[in-house]
Image (spheres, grey):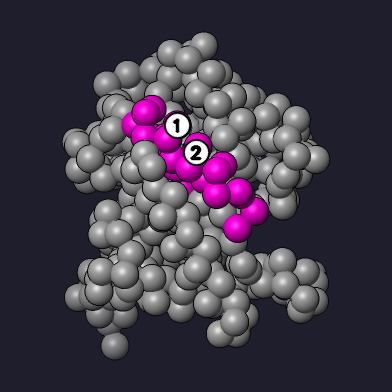
Amino acid sequence: MRVQEALRRHGLPSAGTPAGSDRRFPDGAEFRIEIPSVEGPRVLEAVLEQAGRYDMTVNRISQGSGGMLLEEGELREMAAIGAEAGLEVCLFTGPKAGYDVGAFSRSSDGRSQFAQIRGMRQLRYAVADIARATEAGIRSFLVGDLGLLAVLTRMQGEGDLPSETVWKISAYMGVSNPASIRLLEDMGAGSVNIPADVTLEQLWEIRSSATIPIDLYLETPDSMGPVVRGHEIADFVAVGAPLHAKMGLANAGDVYPSGGHTLATAIANAREKVRRAAIALEWLQRERPASVQSKPHAEGLGVPVSP
Protein backbone atom coordinates (compact mmCIF):
# COMPACT_ATOMS: atom_id res chain seq x y z
CA MET A 1 0.00 0.00 0.00
CA ARG A 2 1.29 3.47 -0.91
CA VAL A 3 0.56 5.20 2.38
CA GLN A 4 1.41 8.72 1.24
CA GLU A 5 -0.80 8.46 -1.84
CA ALA A 6 -3.70 7.18 0.26
CA LEU A 7 -3.31 10.03 2.74
CA ARG A 8 -3.13 12.55 -0.11
CA ARG A 9 -6.44 11.26 -1.51
CA HIS A 10 -7.99 12.12 1.84
CA GLY A 11 -6.64 15.66 1.66
CA LEU A 12 -3.84 15.10 4.17
CA PRO A 13 -0.50 16.69 3.22
CA SER A 14 2.87 15.06 2.80
CA ALA A 15 5.72 16.08 5.06
CA GLY A 16 7.90 18.79 3.63
CA THR A 17 9.17 22.33 3.87
CA PRO A 18 6.60 24.76 5.29
CA ALA A 19 5.08 27.13 2.77
CA GLY A 20 3.21 30.36 3.36
CA SER A 21 -0.55 30.09 3.84
CA ASP A 22 -2.86 31.85 1.40
CA ARG A 23 -5.89 31.33 3.67
CA ARG A 24 -7.39 34.29 5.50
CA PHE A 25 -10.09 35.34 7.97
CA PRO A 26 -13.38 36.44 6.35
CA ASP A 27 -12.22 40.08 6.49
CA GLY A 28 -9.01 39.24 4.59
CA ALA A 29 -6.75 39.47 7.66
CA GLU A 30 -4.00 36.95 8.48
CA PHE A 31 -4.00 37.09 12.26
CA ARG A 32 -5.85 38.18 15.35
CA ILE A 33 -4.63 38.75 18.92
CA GLU A 34 -6.16 36.82 21.83
CA ILE A 35 -5.62 37.38 25.54
CA PRO A 36 -6.65 34.33 27.64
CA SER A 37 -7.68 33.99 31.32
CA VAL A 38 -9.68 37.21 31.33
CA GLU A 39 -11.84 36.10 34.22
CA GLY A 40 -14.38 38.89 34.58
CA PRO A 41 -15.35 42.46 33.72
CA ARG A 42 -12.64 44.11 35.84
CA VAL A 43 -9.94 42.01 34.15
CA LEU A 44 -11.44 42.80 30.73
CA GLU A 45 -11.31 46.50 31.54
CA ALA A 46 -7.63 46.13 32.51
CA VAL A 47 -6.89 44.39 29.19
CA LEU A 48 -8.48 47.17 27.16
CA GLU A 49 -6.80 49.90 29.23
CA GLN A 50 -3.38 48.29 28.75
CA ALA A 51 -4.03 47.70 25.05
CA GLY A 52 -4.84 51.39 24.71
CA ARG A 53 -1.43 52.28 26.12
CA TYR A 54 0.19 50.32 23.30
CA ASP A 55 -2.31 51.42 20.64
CA MET A 56 -2.94 47.71 20.13
CA THR A 57 -6.06 45.90 18.95
CA VAL A 58 -7.16 42.88 20.99
CA ASN A 59 -9.52 40.83 18.84
CA ARG A 60 -10.56 38.17 21.32
CA ILE A 61 -10.39 37.48 25.03
CA SER A 62 -11.09 34.11 26.59
CA GLN A 63 -12.03 33.08 30.11
CA GLY A 64 -11.05 29.80 31.75
CA SER A 65 -13.03 29.35 34.95
CA GLY A 66 -16.39 28.92 33.23
CA GLY A 67 -19.42 31.13 32.83
CA MET A 68 -21.07 29.36 35.77
CA LEU A 69 -18.72 31.25 38.12
CA LEU A 70 -19.81 34.67 36.86
CA GLU A 71 -22.89 36.48 38.12
CA GLU A 72 -25.54 37.23 35.50
CA GLY A 73 -24.74 40.91 35.97
CA GLU A 74 -21.05 40.19 35.27
CA LEU A 75 -21.96 38.26 32.13
CA ARG A 76 -24.03 41.17 30.89
CA GLU A 77 -21.27 43.64 31.73
CA MET A 78 -18.67 41.61 29.83
CA ALA A 79 -21.07 41.38 26.88
CA ALA A 80 -21.60 45.14 26.91
CA ILE A 81 -17.86 45.89 27.10
CA GLY A 82 -17.10 43.43 24.31
CA ALA A 83 -19.89 44.75 22.11
CA GLU A 84 -18.64 48.32 22.46
CA ALA A 85 -15.00 47.38 21.83
CA GLY A 86 -15.84 45.04 18.94
CA LEU A 87 -13.97 42.07 20.37
CA GLU A 88 -14.94 38.47 20.89
CA VAL A 89 -15.66 37.44 24.48
CA CYS A 90 -15.19 33.67 24.81
CA LEU A 91 -16.20 31.84 28.00
CA PHE A 92 -15.24 28.33 28.98
CA THR A 93 -18.13 25.95 29.47
CA GLY A 94 -18.41 25.80 33.24
CA PRO A 95 -18.97 22.19 34.47
CA LYS A 96 -16.09 19.86 33.67
CA ALA A 97 -14.43 16.79 35.14
CA GLY A 98 -11.65 18.79 36.75
CA TYR A 99 -14.17 20.56 39.01
CA ASP A 100 -16.24 17.43 39.71
CA VAL A 101 -16.02 14.91 42.56
CA GLY A 102 -14.11 12.27 40.54
CA ALA A 103 -10.41 12.00 41.32
CA PHE A 104 -9.07 10.69 38.00
CA SER A 105 -9.00 14.05 36.17
CA ARG A 106 -6.79 15.50 38.91
CA SER A 107 -4.38 12.57 38.96
CA SER A 108 -1.04 12.54 37.14
CA ASP A 109 -2.39 10.07 34.57
CA GLY A 110 -5.77 11.74 34.10
CA ARG A 111 -4.96 15.39 33.48
CA SER A 112 -6.02 15.11 29.85
CA GLN A 113 -9.56 14.44 31.12
CA PHE A 114 -9.81 17.78 32.97
CA ALA A 115 -12.25 19.41 30.52
CA GLN A 116 -14.33 16.31 29.77
CA ILE A 117 -18.02 16.14 30.64
CA ARG A 118 -18.95 13.33 33.05
CA GLY A 119 -22.42 11.88 32.70
CA MET A 120 -25.76 13.30 31.61
CA ARG A 121 -26.19 15.48 34.68
CA GLN A 122 -23.01 17.39 33.95
CA LEU A 123 -23.84 17.53 30.23
CA ARG A 124 -27.18 19.14 31.08
CA TYR A 125 -25.48 21.74 33.27
CA ALA A 126 -22.90 22.45 30.56
CA VAL A 127 -25.63 23.22 28.03
CA ALA A 128 -27.52 25.24 30.65
CA ASP A 129 -24.35 27.22 31.37
CA ILE A 130 -24.10 28.18 27.69
CA ALA A 131 -27.80 28.99 27.40
CA ARG A 132 -27.54 31.27 30.45
CA ALA A 133 -24.57 33.14 28.97
CA THR A 134 -26.17 33.53 25.53
CA GLU A 135 -29.19 35.10 27.23
CA ALA A 136 -26.75 37.67 28.65
CA GLY A 137 -25.36 38.40 25.17
CA ILE A 138 -22.26 36.16 24.97
CA ARG A 139 -21.66 34.60 21.55
CA SER A 140 -18.43 32.57 21.92
CA PHE A 141 -17.57 29.53 24.03
CA LEU A 142 -14.60 27.29 24.78
CA VAL A 143 -15.45 23.60 24.41
CA GLY A 144 -13.25 20.78 25.67
CA ASP A 145 -15.49 17.75 25.12
CA LEU A 146 -16.26 16.14 21.74
CA GLY A 147 -19.78 15.01 22.64
CA LEU A 148 -20.65 18.44 23.99
CA LEU A 149 -19.55 20.02 20.70
CA ALA A 150 -21.83 17.64 18.79
CA VAL A 151 -24.80 18.49 21.01
CA LEU A 152 -24.19 22.24 20.79
CA THR A 153 -23.83 22.38 17.02
CA ARG A 154 -27.01 20.31 16.58
CA MET A 155 -28.88 22.62 18.94
CA GLN A 156 -27.55 25.61 17.05
CA GLY A 157 -28.67 24.14 13.74
CA GLU A 158 -32.16 23.58 15.16
CA GLY A 159 -32.41 27.16 16.41
CA ASP A 160 -32.07 26.40 20.13
CA LEU A 161 -28.88 28.49 20.35
CA PRO A 162 -28.02 31.71 18.47
CA SER A 163 -26.84 31.04 14.92
CA GLU A 164 -23.89 33.44 15.22
CA THR A 165 -22.40 31.66 18.25
CA VAL A 166 -18.77 30.58 17.79
CA TRP A 167 -17.37 27.31 19.19
CA LYS A 168 -13.67 27.44 20.09
CA ILE A 169 -11.94 24.13 20.81
CA SER A 170 -9.96 24.20 24.04
CA ALA A 171 -6.28 23.34 24.36
CA TYR A 172 -7.39 20.68 26.86
CA MET A 173 -8.60 18.58 23.93
CA GLY A 174 -4.97 18.31 22.79
CA VAL A 175 -5.55 17.88 19.04
CA SER A 176 -2.32 18.12 17.05
CA ASN A 177 -2.76 16.38 13.69
CA PRO A 178 -4.62 17.38 10.52
CA ALA A 179 -7.12 14.51 10.60
CA SER A 180 -8.35 15.33 14.11
CA ILE A 181 -8.66 19.03 13.30
CA ARG A 182 -10.58 18.32 10.10
CA LEU A 183 -12.99 16.18 12.14
CA LEU A 184 -13.61 19.08 14.52
CA GLU A 185 -14.06 21.42 11.56
CA ASP A 186 -16.62 19.05 10.04
CA MET A 187 -18.46 19.01 13.38
CA GLY A 188 -18.83 22.79 13.38
CA ALA A 189 -15.86 24.05 15.38
CA GLY A 190 -15.09 27.70 14.66
CA SER A 191 -11.42 27.59 15.70
CA VAL A 192 -9.12 25.14 17.42
CA ASN A 193 -6.34 25.43 19.97
CA ILE A 194 -3.30 23.37 19.03
CA PRO A 195 -0.38 22.55 21.37
CA ALA A 196 1.99 25.46 21.96
CA ASP A 197 5.03 23.27 21.29
CA VAL A 198 3.98 22.55 17.69
CA THR A 199 6.82 22.74 15.17
CA LEU A 200 6.58 25.01 12.15
CA GLU A 201 6.39 21.90 9.95
CA GLN A 202 3.48 20.50 11.98
CA LEU A 203 1.71 23.86 11.82
CA TRP A 204 2.09 23.83 8.05
CA GLU A 205 0.72 20.29 7.86
CA ILE A 206 -2.35 21.32 9.85
CA ARG A 207 -2.92 24.46 7.83
CA SER A 208 -2.53 22.59 4.54
CA SER A 209 -5.49 20.43 5.48
CA ALA A 210 -7.78 22.49 7.73
CA THR A 211 -9.47 25.75 6.81
CA ILE A 212 -10.72 26.93 10.23
CA PRO A 213 -8.63 29.43 12.22
CA ILE A 214 -5.88 28.03 14.40
CA ASP A 215 -5.40 29.26 17.98
CA LEU A 216 -1.73 29.11 19.02
CA TYR A 217 -0.20 30.14 22.34
CA LEU A 218 2.93 32.25 21.79
CA GLU A 219 3.59 31.89 25.52
CA THR A 220 2.09 29.46 28.00
CA PRO A 221 1.68 29.24 31.77
CA ASP A 222 4.04 26.95 33.64
CA SER A 223 1.39 24.21 33.75
CA MET A 224 1.63 23.97 29.95
CA GLY A 225 5.38 24.00 29.56
CA PRO A 226 6.16 26.81 29.77
CA VAL A 227 6.78 27.85 26.16
CA VAL A 228 7.98 31.38 25.28
CA ARG A 229 7.86 31.97 21.50
CA GLY A 230 6.50 35.47 20.97
CA HIS A 231 9.52 36.47 18.91
CA GLU A 232 8.57 33.78 16.34
CA ILE A 233 5.17 35.31 15.57
CA ALA A 234 6.10 36.24 11.99
CA ASP A 235 6.78 32.59 11.09
CA PHE A 236 3.55 31.44 12.74
CA VAL A 237 1.45 34.06 10.95
CA ALA A 238 3.06 33.31 7.58
CA VAL A 239 2.53 29.54 7.82
CA GLY A 240 -0.59 29.32 10.00
CA ALA A 241 -2.90 32.09 8.72
CA PRO A 242 -5.69 32.54 9.63
CA LEU A 243 -4.19 32.45 13.12
CA HIS A 244 -5.21 33.65 16.57
CA ALA A 245 -1.90 34.55 18.24
CA LYS A 246 -2.67 33.79 21.87
CA MET A 247 -0.57 35.24 24.68
CA GLY A 248 -0.39 33.27 27.92
CA LEU A 249 2.15 34.02 30.64
CA ALA A 250 4.97 31.98 32.14
CA ASN A 251 6.05 32.34 35.77
CA ALA A 252 2.61 33.64 36.76
CA GLY A 253 0.17 32.96 39.58
CA ASP A 254 -2.67 30.54 38.90
CA VAL A 255 -6.19 32.01 38.87
CA TYR A 256 -8.46 28.99 38.22
CA PRO A 257 -11.16 28.83 39.41
CA SER A 258 -11.21 32.60 39.62
CA GLY A 259 -13.09 34.99 41.89
CA GLY A 260 -12.59 38.01 44.12
CA HIS A 261 -9.79 36.22 45.97
CA THR A 262 -7.68 36.02 42.77
CA LEU A 263 -8.72 39.31 41.16
CA ALA A 264 -5.48 41.21 41.76
CA THR A 265 -3.42 38.35 40.32
CA ALA A 266 -5.72 37.98 37.31
CA ILE A 267 -5.47 41.71 36.54
CA ALA A 268 -1.67 41.75 36.92
CA ASN A 269 -1.35 38.68 34.68
CA ALA A 270 -3.64 40.19 32.04
CA ARG A 271 -1.72 43.45 31.91
CA GLU A 272 1.55 41.60 31.39
CA LYS A 273 0.02 39.40 28.70
CA VAL A 274 -0.96 42.53 26.77
CA ARG A 275 2.58 43.85 27.21
CA ARG A 276 4.02 40.55 25.95
CA ALA A 277 1.66 40.68 22.96
CA ALA A 278 2.85 44.22 22.21
CA ILE A 279 6.45 42.98 22.22
CA ALA A 280 5.52 40.14 19.86
CA LEU A 281 3.92 42.67 17.53
CA GLU A 282 7.18 44.63 17.55
CA TRP A 283 8.90 41.47 16.34
CA LEU A 284 6.23 41.00 13.70
CA GLN A 285 6.78 44.55 12.46
CA ARG A 286 10.54 43.86 12.17
CA GLU A 287 10.24 40.48 10.46
CA ARG A 288 7.04 40.74 8.43
CA PRO A 289 5.77 44.33 8.40
CA ALA A 290 3.05 43.74 5.80
CA SER A 291 1.16 41.28 8.04
CA VAL A 292 -2.54 42.13 8.31
CA GLN A 293 -4.45 42.05 11.60
CA SER A 294 -8.23 42.16 11.89
CA LYS A 295 -9.83 45.37 13.11
CA PRO A 296 -12.55 45.61 15.80
CA HIS A 297 -15.98 44.27 14.83
CA ALA A 298 -14.39 42.16 12.04
CA GLU A 299 -16.50 39.60 10.24
CA GLY A 300 -16.35 36.18 11.87
CA LEU A 301 -15.66 37.40 15.41
CA GLY A 302 -18.06 36.18 18.07
CA VAL A 303 -18.69 39.73 19.29
CA PRO A 304 -21.28 39.80 22.09
CA VAL A 305 -24.71 41.27 21.70
CA SER A 306 -25.16 44.12 24.17
CA PRO A 307 -28.05 43.12 26.47
Residue 48 placed where, x, y %? 50, 23
Residue 43 placed where, x, y %? 61, 32
> What residue is rendered at 20% in x and 75% in y?
9
Q: Does 73 sit above or below residue 14?
A: above
Main SS of the magenta part reads helix
Based on the displayed image, in which of its 4 quarters is residue 23 positioned?
A: top left
Magenta stretch bounds: 68-90
**Dot 2 amino acid type:** Met
> What residue is rendered at 41% in x and 55% in y?
134
Specify whether residue 52 is painted magenta: no
Describe the element under mark 2 as helix, strand or loop: helix
Q: Does 81 sit above or below residue 188?
A: above
Describe the element under mark 1 as helix, strand or loop: helix
- Which corner quadrant holds the C terminus? top left
Give the labeled residue for mark 1: 81
Based on the displayed image, in which of its 4 quarters is residue 249 positioned?
A: top right
Q: Is residue 71 visible?
A: yes
Residue nearest the observer in this picture, 104 or 47: 47
Give the labeled residue for mark 2: 78
Q: Is residue 232 left or right of residue 292?
A: right
> What residue is rendered at 59% in x and 24% in y?
46
Q: Does 66 sit above or below residue 304?
A: below
Residue 82 placed where, x, y %? 42, 35
Specify whether residue 86 is painted magenta: yes
> What residue is rendered at 41% in x and 16% in y?
286
